[in-house]
Amino acid sequence: MSGRIIIGVTGSIAAFKSLELVRMLVKNGKEIDVILTEAGERFIPKVNFKSFTSGTVASDLWSEEVNQPIHIKLSKAASILVVVPASADFIAKAAAGIADNLLLSTFLAFNGPKIIAPAMNPNMYKNPITLRNIRTLRKFGVDFIEPTTGYMADYLIGVGHLADLQDIFDYIEKYERKQVLKGKKVLITAGGTREFLDPVRFIGNPSTGTMGIELAREFWKFGAEVKLISANISKQIPSYIKNIEVINSEEMLKVVRKNFKASDIFVSTAAISDFTPRTPKKVKIKKSTDLKEIKLKRTIDIIKEISKHKGKKKIIGFAAETLNLESEAEHKLIEKKLDLIVGNYVGKNRGFGEITSEGIILGEKTRIEFSGLTKPELSRKILEVILQVWY
């Protein structure tokens, strides 16, 4: 789907965040028109939006000089309409079919996908009248991005805080893409496991989980139902992604086994420890202890274990190597019965925690080298390969 995106801004203290959303969209090549309600303009003047977009920025149904009614002109040119933030007043009027301002008139005239991101006081959001109005709009096909828990204008914490802007951006991108993976269930592991020596010390690695999170975003944008199994990550996980937290390799294996059967695609990006202590201590090892050696045992190779029950499922693995990347990745591709493997060079200034990646994507009929790609860019490249080869 292509076309202009309408961003509607209503009277909410979160209105200032819509400026950042417009900047994000324009930076990514989107064509944006902005409509403010009278209350919205009290929070953010039109001139602020005009500095971010070359599109229309309007607020008055009657005074804008155009060749046809402005709400009709804007609605015909748009592919998506997003109201962010949406006040209780806007939601109530939209549910009742009232069109007494430019945004409401455009909302009624527009026939494409409509997304509403509410932001208001928790008492207003939880009011049965507001909840009824939301149910009404949902019944008519309007999509809602739920508010989160956060600090409100009165410094209290409650549900009514505007959803994360990256999540709103992702919803918009999802509507722009063909839902070719709709009905597919994708299981992704992310992060790095920790194998504890005692209650405070562990064997681990620097994996941040970013790759798994970015892949989860991309699969979701193409319509897949995504479940993430995350190990010790500090990155924010999108609100629309189901997440199960684990700590060590044993927990990771248990959760993967439980969820693998119901999945169509399994993606193993997590950095799983190859070793775990034979006898972890139940109390902290004192600094004065004469610790001459730590006895370790191998952990189960999760992806190799899961591949035994592969069937018709697709499995994607990741390999992190310092040397002989292609030969090592190719060996793992065959040995572990993978459909695709992404090999990454790791070491000084590359790999875990770095902004860009360097490596190779291998499959039965695939060989793509990459360099200088950010994790989001690499995720898009991987999805591009998947859609070309499998779907």
Image: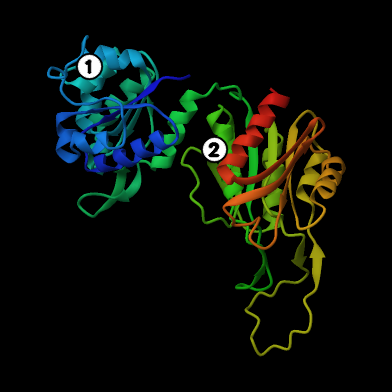
Image quadrant of residue 142?
Answer: top left
Q: In the rendered view, does 317 fall on the left or right side of 36?
A: right
Q: Which numbered disc flags the more N-terminal residue, 1 or 2?
A: 1
Seen from the viewer's position, the closer of residues 244 and 166 is: 166
Look at the image and name its color scheme.
rainbow
At numbered mark 2, what does the secondary structure look like: helix, strand or loop?
Answer: helix
Find residue 140 and report its image quarter. top left
Residue located at (69% from left, 75% from top): 281
Position of the C terminus by quadrant: top right
Query: At which x and y percent is residue 199?
Result: 61, 72
What amino acid is found at the position of numbered circle 1 in the picture?
Ser
- Neighbour tally class for label 2: few under 14, some 14-19, many 20 plus, Cα within 10 Å: many
Q: Residue at x 18, y 26 (%)?
A: 59
Q: How many marks?
A: 2
Q: Nearer the viewer, residue 227 or 80?
A: 80
Distance (Cα) linking label 1 and label 2: 33 Å
* Residue 271 located left or right of residue 163: right
The answer to whether residue 55 shows anywhere in this view is yes
Closest to the observer, 218 or 160: 218
Q: Residues within 10 Å of mark 1 (few under 14, many from 20)?
A: some
Residue that badge 1 annotates: 105
Across and down, in percent, residue 97 comes to: 23, 16
Residue 270: % across, % down: 67, 50
For badge 2, the amino acid type reads: Arg
Residue 227 appears anywhere in the view: no
Residue 33 vertical position relative to residue 234 in the rendered view, above or below: above
Residue 273 picture location, percent across and down: 72, 59
* Residue 114 drawn above or below residue 22: above
Q: Which residue is mark 2?
A: 217
Q: Residue at x 58, y 46 (%)?
A: 374
